[in-house]
Image (tube, rainbow, N blue to C red):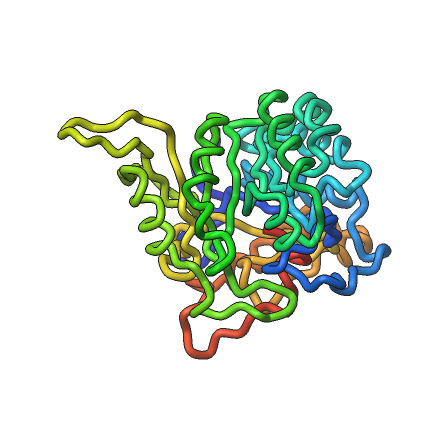
């Protein structure tokens, strides 16, 4: 066990979590992420190969990363996804093997969940914004709700847990499903996490007025449930609450589980951020909203040694700002959309 933190930025934040985007492609076209026609894809030659991805991840784990989250686009679209998970799970750093998790739309889990679990995937976060088939088509522009729900069940059956479901509430579209979505997640023994919509869409259609805030989400839930804040958040992005049925008596209602609210815009948690992000084309980002990136792909392909790549990671960390700046008057949305950055 190491005695000192290895990846610390200029503001004293220790970084343990690496988000790796495996592809910018996706098989849905969610309205808050990209336009119906999609976006220009990254050039295939620019994407990290399996050996390149594992090389960079190995350097990061050696430098102190203990959790790797696979994202996209849609990570299950990588044909070598099982090999990627297996290779990452086998890495070893100062604190042992990293925990490997994944954020996915769930469409491919019906077929892949058992193999991913066997390869070393620990858990999944699955995006689910509605339980209505017609509304799913409206939001995702694809008729795939049944496949998503089958993927959720496959994850449960494969033991990829604790299961987390991610929902983005949109004003006038799906706020009426907040309670139903939470009951669905609780019924599976999972945790629903409501995420404030962020200015990361490819169409730049986000507005502060159109965003459903964390306070609004909490009010929707508290009309049906009793929510009690849970301590010990640490570096986690979600504020977590104990969920109970409302009781007519003075005693507490039945404990149903937990819910999380990720309020990136209205309740920023930058002060405890422990995350770095690697794009599918090998660019390191020290913040989801960063305007700059550090190129790791080019030196890697030129044969750079581990020491040089490690130094580049530390240089990126040294330039990390204290916060994302969404609420600053001069805030500018990142050049890349979420699908190209990775969540």
Instruction: Please name the residue shown 40% across and 53% down the image.
Output: 12
151, 225: nearer the viewer:
225
Looking at the rendered structure, the number of numbered marks drawn on it comes to 0
Task: Tell whether 192 sits left or right of 148.
Answer: left
The image quadrant that residue 76 belongs to is: top right
Percent coordinates x, y for residue 204 in the rendering: 60, 70
Percent coordinates x, y for residue 104 in the rendering: 64, 41
Q: Is residue 326 above or below residue 242?
A: below
82, 294: nearer the viewer:
82
Q: Is residue 301 above or below residue 157?
A: below
The image quadrant that residue 267 belongs to is: bottom left
Task: Tell whether 230 sits left or right of 67.
Answer: left
Evaluate whether residue 231 shows in this view.
no
Instruction: Please name the residue shown 33% across and 34% down the image.
Output: 243
Task: Tell whether 187 sits left or right of 340.
Answer: left
Task: Return the residue found at the far bottom.
Answer: 330
């Amino acid at each position: 066990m190491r005695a000192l933190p290895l990846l610390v930025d200029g503001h004293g934040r220790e970084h343990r979590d690496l988000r790796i985007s495996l592809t910018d492609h996706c098989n849905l076209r969610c309205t808050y992420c990209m336009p119906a026609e999609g976006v220009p894809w990254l050039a295939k030659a620019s994407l990290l190969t399996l050996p390149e991805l594992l090389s960079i991840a190995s350097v990061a784990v050696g430098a102190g990363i203990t959790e790797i989250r696979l994202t996209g686009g849609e990570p299950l679209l990588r044909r070598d996804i099982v090999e990627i998970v297996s290779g990452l799970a086998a890495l070893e750093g100062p604190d042992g093997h990293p925990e490997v998790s994944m954020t996915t739309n769930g469409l491919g889990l019906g077929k892949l969940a058992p193999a991913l679990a066997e390869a070393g995937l620990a858990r999944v976060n699955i995006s689910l914004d509605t339980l209505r088939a017609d509304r799913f088509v409206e939001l995702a522009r694809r008729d795939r709700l049944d496949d998503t729900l089958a993927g959720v069940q496959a994850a449960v059956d494969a033991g990829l847990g604790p299961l987390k479901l991610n929902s983005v509430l949109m004003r006038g579209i799906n706020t009426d499903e907040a309670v139903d979505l939470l009951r669905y997640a609780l019924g599976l023994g999972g945790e629903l996490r409501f995420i404030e919509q962020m200015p990361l869409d490819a169409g730049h259609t986000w507005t502060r007025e159109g965003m459903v805030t964390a306070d609004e989400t909490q009010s929707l839930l508290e009309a049906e449930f009793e929510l009690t804040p849970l301590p010990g958040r640490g570096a986690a992005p979600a504020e977590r609450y104990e969920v109970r049925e409302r009781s007519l008596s003075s005693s507490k209602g039945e404990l149903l589980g937990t819910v999380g609210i990720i309020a990136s815009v209205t309740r920023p948690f930058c002060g405890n951020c422990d995350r770095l992000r690697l794009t599918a084309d090998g660019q390191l980002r020290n913040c989801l909203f960063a305007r700059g990136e550090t190129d790791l792909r080019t030196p890697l392909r030129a044969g750079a040694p581990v020491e040089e790549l490690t130094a580049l990671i530390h240089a990126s960390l040294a330039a990390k700002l204290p916060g994302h700046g969404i609420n600053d008057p001069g805030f500018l949305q990142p050049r890349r959309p979420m699908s190209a950055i990775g969540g």
